Image (cartoon, rainbow, N blue to C red):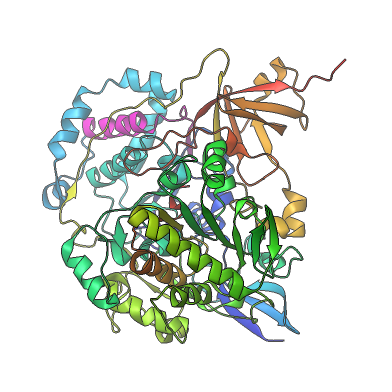
């Protein structure tokens, strides 16, 4: 049962904690004793951090709206459609018709790449996230 | 934060304003408790008697939205009693005379009348804060989510600079960042006006740097902010929106406007873990991998960049956001190929000066590094502004009271504030999947003072109607003296009681922060039909 050291996602404190993995499932979390923030301690959200990971409500396939209803599709179909539509809107509206919302829950690497995608591919600076909320 | 979280426990005075720290930042609150145990004095400025306010040495229960006159009042007393730091003002700041002029014109009786806080209490707070050597100010969204949010922050900075309470260890001004990586998302340039490391897009030199690195032309026109995008209306300029891990259909103000905007789009893509209220409106929904299924870094409130490590492969059918973005860019004629998140970080280090020394191999073998970290040898920076401010001299920007955007009247006599609770996180898409978290705090509660509840015969736990000029919702009443008479408080975590149907769309014109902390509201008993 390996323990994987990682960082909590539930607030800006940034506790260091271990995720417990058993047969491909995350079964619990414990605080790191030496981490400068957690120091062997977590709040109630940190102790229950693992619970949403294997929730039955997780989305597990792409969905495309067909005749008004979100319908399961393949990744290729969903990504092709997304790329085509974004390119079409960019073609029609110039640099002001597309917007992107990045996320304060995603990693730095993902945020970096998304703003690069927005600026270099979509050619717009219309990118923001919920820092103001 | 200009300090590290652990420095708070060494402070001698801690001034907390607009932060429900024990619930929203439990680890920071722990440091405050430790400091108090060692003899530090705790001052809490908050309209509510929060758990922290209840144990503070001094609680200043101001009327909502009166932070500026209160802080100006404290500064006037500091000035009158000559508790200012002359040397610091002389050596490190500019424009002090403008602040002094404003303070000399300030009428302290007027301050008491506007804020509702007795002069004696304001004086005690002012003396405690100014007389000490090591004082930290911790603030949160109670300061920023006002139409005068920027001025609120500047006024706090005035107070800190006037008394020289910056630039040192254990002493500074600490905005507590709410979400796990909100600091990092800002640092990475997920903002409409700046590239990574806050390099303005309108500056030709910076633009040229990124054009060279990315081998493409870039726009120098700052983009639209979040609320401009979600409040554009059905015929707004935005025709297509790509949303990664956000839920504006619960988190943004005036939800009816957000819905009109999102349903009026030609194309909406949502990348998320769950079928959120926003995803339900999308044309395409893409299932993402959670933090346990990917590698990368988060930056916490004290600027500490730390590793997030993959514990399990993505749940079958899900992809990481990195894969999704790379897949799309490939299809759109601008391939961005990276073998690993570590390789993305190498590019970040190259283009983002404050992250210049951040490499996964360094972060792997430490508890993270605090930016600015300029190069591979740099040890990181636990506290900011030593010897000089980023802009050179600290600039005093005096401000005066601004009335909240929405006045109360006979129909809407209450001031409604919104915020967070201990067991839930943001729009609850993750935290509400947890059994215990939901058992302990599974529904929205509206705090109402016993006097107000008694007048309308509202009982604890009773379902009532809460309405503003924009709509009404049903919510359970929690009769509590945490709130003052005439004020109400609730949370925005629950889609069954979407409080942001009611909040006002008014915002700080400079920062574009919505005024979540005050809107006019009324409560009503639910009448059973005959």
Name the residue located 44 percent from the left edge and 22 percent from the top edge. B116
Q: Quadrant of the N terminus of chain A?
A: bottom right
Does residue A98 appear to the left or right of A21 in the view shown? left
How far from the left and from the top, in percent, is residue B526? 77, 23
Outermost residue toward the top in this view: B410
Q: State the residue in front, B232 or B421.
A: B232
Magenta span contains residue B346: no
Q: Is residue B204 above or below residue B237?
A: below
Q: Residue B484 at what x, y percent from top left?
A: 57, 26
B256 sits left or right of B15 in the view: right
Taking the view exactly as shown, the residue that stands out farthest to the right is B530
The image shows residue B359 at horizontal and vertical percentages of 38, 82
Q: Is residue B249 above or below residue B78?
A: below
Q: Is residue A16 above or below residue B110?
A: below
Residue B436 is left or right of residue B269, and the answer is right
Viewer-nearest residue: B252 or B489: B252
Question: Is B338 displayed left or right of B283 in the figure?
Answer: left
Corner quadrant of residue B436: bottom right
> Could you say which is closer to the camera, residue B417 or residue B395?
B417
- The answer to which of B227 and B467 lies nearer the viewer is B227
Residue B5 shows up from this direction: no
Give the magenta part as a residue range: B57-81
User: Does the image show residue B326?
Assistant: yes
Say which residue appears at 69% left-offset and 66% top-offset: A59
Seen at 48% across and 72% down, the residue is B328
Q: How many marks?
A: 0
Q: In the image, is residue B78 part of the stretch drawn in magenta?
A: yes
Residue B510: x and y in percent read 31, 41
């Amino acid at each position: 049962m390996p323990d994987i050291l990682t960082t909590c996602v539930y607030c800006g404190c940034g506790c260091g904690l271990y995720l417990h993995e058993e047969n491909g499932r995350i079964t619990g979390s414990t605080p790191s004793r030496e981490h400068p923030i957690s120091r062997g301690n977590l709040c109630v959200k940190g102790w229950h951090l693992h619970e949403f990971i294997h929730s039955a409500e997780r989305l597990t396939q792409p969905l495309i709206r067909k005749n008004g209803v979100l319908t399961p599709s393949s990744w290729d179909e969903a990504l092709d459609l997304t790329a085509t539509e974004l390119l079409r809107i960019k073609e029609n509206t110039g640099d002001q018709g597309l917007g992107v919302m990045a996320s304060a829950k995603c990693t730095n690497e993902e945020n970096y790449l998304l703003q690069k995608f927005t600026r270099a591919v979509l050619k717009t600076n219309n990118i923001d996230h919920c820092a103001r909320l | 934060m200009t300090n590290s979280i652990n420095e708070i426990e060494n402070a001698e005075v801690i001034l907390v304003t607009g932060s429900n720290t024990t619930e929203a930042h439990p680890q920071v609150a722990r440091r405050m408790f430790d400091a108090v145990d060692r003899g530090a004095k705790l001052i809490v400025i908050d309209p509510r008697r929060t758990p922290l306010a209840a144990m503070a040495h001094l609680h200043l229960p101001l009327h909502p939205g009166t932070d500026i006159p209160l802080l100006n009042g404290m500064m006037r007393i500091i000035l009158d009693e000559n508790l200012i730091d002359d040397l610091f003002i002389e050596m490190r700041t500019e424009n002090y005379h403008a602040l002094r002029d404003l303070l000399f014109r300030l009428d302290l009786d007027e301050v008491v009348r506007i804020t509702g806080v007795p002069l004696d209490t304001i004086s005690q707070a002012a003396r405690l804060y100014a007389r000490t050597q090591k004082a930290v100010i911790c603030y949160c969204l109670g300061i920023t989510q006002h139409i005068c949010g920027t001025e609120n922050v500047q006024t706090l900075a005035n107070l800190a600079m006037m008394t020289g309470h910056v630039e040192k260890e254990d002493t500074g001004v600490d905005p507590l960042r709410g979400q796990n990586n909100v600091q990092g998302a800002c640092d990475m340039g997920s903002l409409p006006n700046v590239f990574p490391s806050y390099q303005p897009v309108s500056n030709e030199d910076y633009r040229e740097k990124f054009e060279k690195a990315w081998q493409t032309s870039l726009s120098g026109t700052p983009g639209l902010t979040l609320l401009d995008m979600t409040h554009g209306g059905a015929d707004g300029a935005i025709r297509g929106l790509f949303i990664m891990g956000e839920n504006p259909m619960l988190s943004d103000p005036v939800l009816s406007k957000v819905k009109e905007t999102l349903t009026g789009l030609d194309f909406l893509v949502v990348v998320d873990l769950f079928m959120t209220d926003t995803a339900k409106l999308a044309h395409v929904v893409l299932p993402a991998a959670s933090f346990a299924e990917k590698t990368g870094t988060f930056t916490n409130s004290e600027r500490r960049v730390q590793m997030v490590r993959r514990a399990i492969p993505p749940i079958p059918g899900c992809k990481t956001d990195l894969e999704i973005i790379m897949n799309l860019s490939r299809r759109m004629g601008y391939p961005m190929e990276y073998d690993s998140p570590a390789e993305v970080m190498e590019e970040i280090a190259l283009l983002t000066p404050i992250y210049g020394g951040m490499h996964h191999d360094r972060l792997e073998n430490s508890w993270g590094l605090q930016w600015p970290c300029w190069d591979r040898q740099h040890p990181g920076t636990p506290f900011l502004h030593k010897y000089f401010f980023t802009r050179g001299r600290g600039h005093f920007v005096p401000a005066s009271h601004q009335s909240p955007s929405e006045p109360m009247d006979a129909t809407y006599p209450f001031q409604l504030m919104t915020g967070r609770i201990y067991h839930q996180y943001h729009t609850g898409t993750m935290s509400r999947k947890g059994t215990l978290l939901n058992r302990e705090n599974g529904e929205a509660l509206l705090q109402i003072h016993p006097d107000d509840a008694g007048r309308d015969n509202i009982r604890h736990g009773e379902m009532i109607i809460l309405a503003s000029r924009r709509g009404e919702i049903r919510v359970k009443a929690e009769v509590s003296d945490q709130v003052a008479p005439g004020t109400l408080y609730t949370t925005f975590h629950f889609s069954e009681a979407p409080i942001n149907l009611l909040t006002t769309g008014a915002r700080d014109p400079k920062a574009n922060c919505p005024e979540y902390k005050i809107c006019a509201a009324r409560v009503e008993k639910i009448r059973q039909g005959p």
